[in-house]
Amino acid sequence: MAEALHTWLGERREELERELFGVVLPFWTEYSIDSEQGGFFTCLDATGQVYDEKKYVWLQGRQCWMFARIANSYTEEEITALSAKHRPSFRNSLQKGDSLATRIDITRPSLINAAKRGVDFLFEHAIREEDGHVYFCLSRDGKPVLHQRKPFSALFLVMALKEVGVAISDSSYVQKAMQLFLRAKGWIDTPGSLGKPALEGAPPLEALAEPMILLNVAEELLSESASLELSAEHNEMLREIQRQSVRAILKHVIRDPISKRVVHVPELVKEDGTPYYEGTEGRVLNYGHVIEAGWFLLSYCRSEQTRQSGSANDGDHGQTPLPPIPEIEATALEVLDWAFEEGWDEENGGGILYFGDAKSMPVTSLEWSLKLFWPINEAMVASMHALLTVLHKGRGSIADSETEMEAEKQKERFSKTFNFALQHMSDEKHGEWYGYLNRECKVHLNFKGAAYKGCFHVPRSLLFCRELVDRALSVLEEGRKNSGGKEVKE
């Protein structure tokens, strides 16, 4: 089993890098760079033509982060070699003069330069001077178009500032990221501070999205390259925010009182963690969000184990008590099982449904049955995280039947989701993925970028899965050494 898994992981590594460097990344370097005004065009049709010049701030921040993250993940030589090896079959198919974008080569310096120009554009134009709020949408030249009254644009700008700061070795960007993160955390903690007050008749519900993004962005700031630029006080503050976020996420896991199995993970719960099934909003099941929350928890557990192993305060949970790490991992794996079983639409060709209802009542969101790109992306990353967790538990050995069965399940889950995407979403002819399929798995909306789809989920999933493959291979190799070289043949 270990030898077969080793081979399978190697094959997936090649596949993931081919898709990233041969299909997805070239689309964005070809068609999205606005070298005249700064930032990126993200409203792109199927062939890369700009159909709207507006710049959605959360997508701008995500693309800055993505370009810088790729640059920080590979050496200059590796990026050059991978770009040459997986040169896309498409190359600017637009007639000269038809495109507003400036094509850039995929090199480490060009990715960093585009990311830095993008984040500088945002820092200059996206932050409202009088109160520090971050706009949702800007005109091409940076004038405000829309303020959404949500914290997400700010938090993706945090990620961009941090990753660019690491890429250019400028600690001031990381410091700005930390300052903006704490400001955004304050907005979340203070209802109405973004101009959206809680009304008297509205039930006091807690959303899954907010602790999820706080957990993830705090993890970004706690990454070794960034945390070195922050004070010990800020590092501990981030860990406490993570603990609070994990606790808030776990409140959404609803179990059967008798069997204790997971029965629902609703998007909204009451403040005490009990479900709110009286209203439609309380019954909403967002399978993609649940899957994303699952791998955020697994990632947190792995990082926290590493941090605790090098700390004199091993096991200290600060002000917010949490279950032991193994218990959080087990819950995350249960949550992923539930979301895949409930959300995967086997009878209609596969894919993950957008929304469900906890009581099987009518789902009022018109797009409920669409199959979107990002839940598939999250499922890919989640299954690889789950596989890595299984291998870590077995210390790289797959000697017992339980570990073998669990590893095989995660392998099959990844293959099912990735193959679905390659078959129905990936577009080798023009680049990138289509993002929105109908229930019969046909392309429903034929653009590649819009207000809610940019250069983020697809390339992030490919990059993260490639990194998780490498980590899994390392764990297998460690297991082989510990077993005297009997598990995996080189």
Image (cartoon, rainbow, N blue to C red):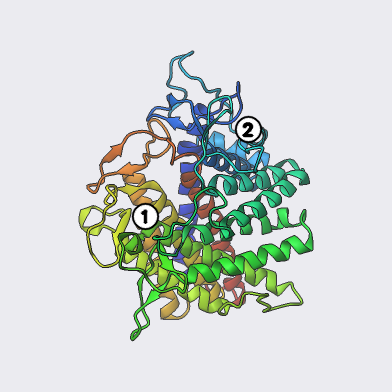
Q: Nearer the viewer, residue 51 or 98?
A: 51
SS under mark 1: helix
In the displayed structure, 49 sits above or below 367; it is: above
Residue 380, picture quadrant: bottom left
SS under mark 2: helix
Relative to 284, is 449 on the left or the right? right
Residue appearing at x 56%, y 64% in the figure: 299
Give the image location of residue 82, x and y in percent. 56, 39
Residue underneath mark 2: 125
Give the image location of residue 67, x and y in percent. 59, 40
Give the image location of residue 119, x and y in percent. 64, 37
Query: As drawn, which residue projects farthest toward the top?
Result: 97
**Quadrant in which the C terminus is drawn:** bottom right
Residue appearing at x 34%, y 80% in the figure: 256
Residue appearing at x 70%, y 64% in the figure: 237
Residue 140, picture quadrant: top right
Residue appearing at x 43%, y 27% in the figure: 48
Q: Which of 342 and 424 is in front in this view?
A: 342
Query: As drawn, which residue projects farthest toward the bottom?
Result: 258
Give the image location of residue 322, x and y in percent. 58, 77
Relative to 325, is 238 on the left or the right? right
Disc 1 residue type? Thr
Disc 2 residue type? His
Residue 442 in sight: yes
In the displayed structure, 343 sits above or below 316; it is: above
| Mark-to-mark CA distance, 2 and 1 | 38 Å
Residue underneath mark 1: 417
Residue 490 in sight: no
- First along the sequence among labels 2 and 1: 2
Q: Residues within 10 Å of mark 2 (few under 14, many from 20)?
A: some
